[in-house]
Image: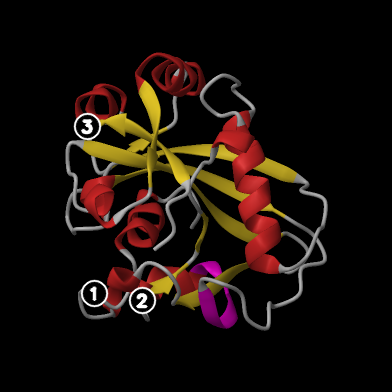
Amino acid sequence: MSTELVLCVRRSAAVMIAPDPFTPAGPGMAEAIAAMLLDRASYRPRTPELEADEDLKQVIPYAAVEDPDRGLFLTYARHGAEGRLADRLSLGLGGHLIPADGAQCESSGIVRGLLRELKEELCQDLPISTLQLLGLLNDDSDPVGRVHLGVAYHVKISGLQLPQGGPEGKDWKWASRADLRGWHQFAPGVVESWSMRLIESGLLC
């Protein structure tokens, strides 16, 4: 695992604005996130020790990506650096925030980090037509969730092509809203928990 610096917040700070596994965005949430990152966040080396430190939450912009022309979402099976999520179905794309994103001092930094991650994952550089903050994922139901805080978005990008690979995903497919609603039928552990939280929220489907 690399020793890059990643943005983290204390668990106590995350719970203050995200008390539930998924807290939908409401008035003032974007400002609350920015204030938390300004006052309570710090960069830590991404080490095995950090991945086990449940007093800290690594901040992850996490986007459900839809092609509005098709009305379909990108989905994939996970692989890559986070072995604890290997082969789980996911509709979320994103990753850690690094100092170059500027998320600790600029409200636009989270989006900058998200766009960087989308370009890396999709191997495409297409303009985003819509970017909507959905809420915060503070889900302690599994070991990965206990050390991460997700800033969830719904992103629409026209003209997307299915990626042929990528550092974190494989078996890319399109999924309709009906397909996503059907994911609840899978056995526990088949679908990434953050993806299920977004589907169950009803904000996408």
How many residues crowd around disc 2 within 10 Å: few (fewer than 14), some, or many (20 or more)? some
Nearer to us in this view, 202 or 66: 66
Q: Amino acid at mark 2?
A: Arg
User: Mark 3 is on which residue type?
Assistant: Arg
**Front residue of this view, candidates 71 and 80:** 80
Q: Quick one: 115 or 68, which is closer to the camera? A: 115
Query: Earlier along the polypeptide chain: callout 3 or callout 2?
Result: 3
Q: Is residue 8 above or below residue 83?
A: above
Residue 107: horizontal and vertical position, in percent? 59, 22
Q: Position of residue 170 (x, y in %)?
A: 53, 82
Whether label 2 touches label 1, CB < 8 Å: yes
Indicate the amino acid at tag 1.
Gly
Secondary structure under badge 3? helix
Give the overall secondary structure of the magenta segment: strand
Hey, which residue is sitting farthest front in the picture? Answer: 3
Residue 173 image point, x, y percent = 59, 81
Label 3 to label 2, Cα distance in Å?
A: 25 Å
Give the residue at x 29% y 39%.
57
Q: Which residue is mark 1?
A: 189
Residue under pointer 3? 11
